[in-house]
């Protein structure tokens, strides 16, 4: 495969070669047209001069006519179809043209001729110009032009190759540095090349920006991997210790307490893995079939589930009406439970409020938006950080999963907060909007 540099040079070569050939052909035909016009004007002028001469000459004067002329001019005069005068050609050279009663311009192998008839005196004047005096050097001229064109083409190819090499040199450096970056650690690696134009500068800027984002993503993935390992190691370690204690325990009460703690940790680990697996499936496009279902019923089912798991929390439910909605029922139910669970788990007060209502987008639109609103009092949530990467226990994976489920349904998950009289406590409000 040819290099880009060679291709650019070849395009230079081909393009200018075509232009030079077009120029050469055009110049030749223009030259030929101009020369023939010159021939024709001279021939007509000579024929007119000779015709006036013979008209004024005494027809009975048989003296020898002496004419001065140039080597490229030929002449024959016929009277009554008999040769009367011949100059610079063999006698009777144009007799066949006279016999054909030709008039005007005509051409032979080497001559451009003009024939004029004078009916009054029955004279036929034929004047010609030998084209070899004008076109004899044309082959040498063409060879010289072709030689010059070849030199120009080679010069253009060489110059184009040098210019393209200089312009493409930054691309070679970029390729080498990117290959080196891929094979080694990406941390701190940036592309630095001599900029030869605006396009190269924009390319370098875009590559460095991409490398920066890629480096940040890799760091986040590494951090997430550590977080994931920690989240799995802690409950499993606790389960192992609990089981070991059960083997040696003599008191049922203490054993039951350890079993409950282990069960809770295992449940959280399983829930964490389920959320992670579901998020992975959604990113792969694995989505359940959409169907019609009642949003109010989904709220009540998750309310009952949360009430059993968090018996100390007072969960208030406000459903304005039975609202039918078309979507993935299991996904919506999972998102609602995540929001309720987070509100119950991290609320610093006993009350959690769940509301389901509709709101019209605009006065000119009839399609309402279904809003599931869950609020609780606790510490302010770093929502912007959570959207970038799930790094905080209990919030990151679940809220990102809720946001992804909302996007699948062309909806949004928004967060807001209101200050409270209590220091470092705010009313956290999550709204799941489903159009």
Image: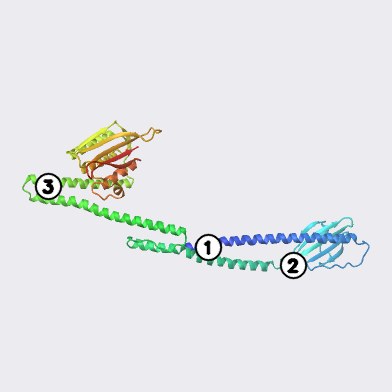
Mark whose residue sits in front, 3 or 1? 3
Q: In this view, does 428 lie to the left or right of 144?
A: left
Q: Which residue lies furthest to the right in this view?
A: 60
Give the secondary structure at mark 1: helix
Across and down, in percent, residue 308 comes to: 18, 38
Kindly indicate the quadrant of the structure image that contains residue 432.
top left
Whether residue 2 is visible here, answered yes or no, is no
Q: Is residue 358 left or right of residue 158?
A: left
Quadrant occupied by the C terminus = top left
Report crowding for label 2: few under 14, some 14 to 19, many 20 or more residues within 10 A (C-alpha): few
What color scheme is it? rainbow
Q: Is residue 420 left or right of residue 50?
A: left
Give the secondary structure at mark 2: helix
Give the secondary structure at mark 3: helix
Q: Label 1 belongs to which residue?
A: 10
Mark whose residue sits in front, 2 or 3? 3
Q: Label 3 belongs to which residue?
A: 258
Q: Which residue lies furthest to the top in this view?
A: 321
Along the line of sight, which residue is nearer the eye, 341 or 301?
Answer: 341
Residue 133's label in the rendered image is 2
Along the line of sight, which residue is nearer the eye, 179 or 203?
Answer: 203
């Amino acid at each position: 495969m040819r290099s880009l540099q060679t291709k650019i040079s070849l395009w230079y070569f081909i393009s200018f070669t075509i232009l030079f050939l077009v120029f050469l052909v055009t110049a030749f035909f223009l030259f030929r047209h101009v020369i023939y016009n010159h021939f024709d004007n001279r021939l007509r002028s000579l024929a007119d001069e000779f015709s006036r001469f013979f008209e004024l000459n005494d027809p009975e004067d048989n003296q020898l006519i002496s004419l001065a002329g140039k080597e490229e001019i030929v002449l024959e005069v016929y009277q009554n179809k008999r040769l009367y005068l011949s100059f610079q050609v063999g006698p009777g050279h144009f007799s066949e043209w006279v016999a054909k009663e030709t008039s005007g311009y005509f051409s032979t192998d080497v001559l451009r001729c003009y024939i004029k008839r004078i009916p009054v005196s029955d004279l036929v004047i034929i004047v010609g110009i030998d084209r070899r005096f004008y076109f004899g050097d044309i082959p040498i001229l063409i060879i010289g032009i072709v030689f010059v064109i070849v030199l120009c083409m080679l010069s253009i190819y060489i110059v184009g190759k040098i210019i393209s090499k200089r312009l493409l040199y930054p691309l070679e450096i970029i390729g080498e540095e990117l290959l080196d970056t891929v094979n080694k650690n990406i941390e701190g690696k940036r592309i630095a090349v001599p900029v030869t134009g605006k396009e190269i500068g924009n390319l370098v800027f875009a590559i460095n920006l991409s490398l920066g984002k890629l480096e940040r993503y890799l760091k986040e993935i590494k951090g997430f991997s550590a977080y994931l390992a920690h989240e799995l190691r802690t409950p499993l370690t606790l389960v192992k210790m609990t089981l070991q204690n059960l083997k040696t325990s003599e008191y049922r009460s203490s054993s039951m307490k350890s079993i409950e703690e282990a069960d809770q940790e295992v449940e959280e680990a399983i829930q964490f893995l389920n959320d992670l697996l579901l998020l992975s499936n959604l990113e792969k496009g694995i989505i359940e079939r959409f169907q019609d279902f009642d949003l109010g019923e989904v709220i009540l089912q998750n309310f009952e589930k949360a009430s059993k798991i968090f018996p100390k929390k007072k969960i208030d439910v406000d459903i304005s009406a039975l609202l039918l909605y078309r979507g993935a029922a299991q996904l919506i139910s999972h998102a609602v439970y995540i929001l309720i669970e987070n509100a119950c788990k991290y609320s610093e007060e006993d009350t959690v409020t769940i509301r389901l209502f509709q709101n019209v987008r605009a006065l000119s639109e009839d399609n309402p938006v279904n809003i599931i609103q869950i609020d609780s009092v606790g510490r302010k949530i770093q929502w912007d950080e959570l959207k970038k990467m799930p790094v905080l226990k209990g919030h990151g994976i679940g809220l990102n999963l809720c946001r992804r489920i909302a996007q699948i349904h062309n909806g949004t998950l928004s967060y807001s907060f209101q200050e409270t009289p209590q220091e470092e406590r705010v009313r956290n409000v999550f709204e799941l909007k489903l159009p």
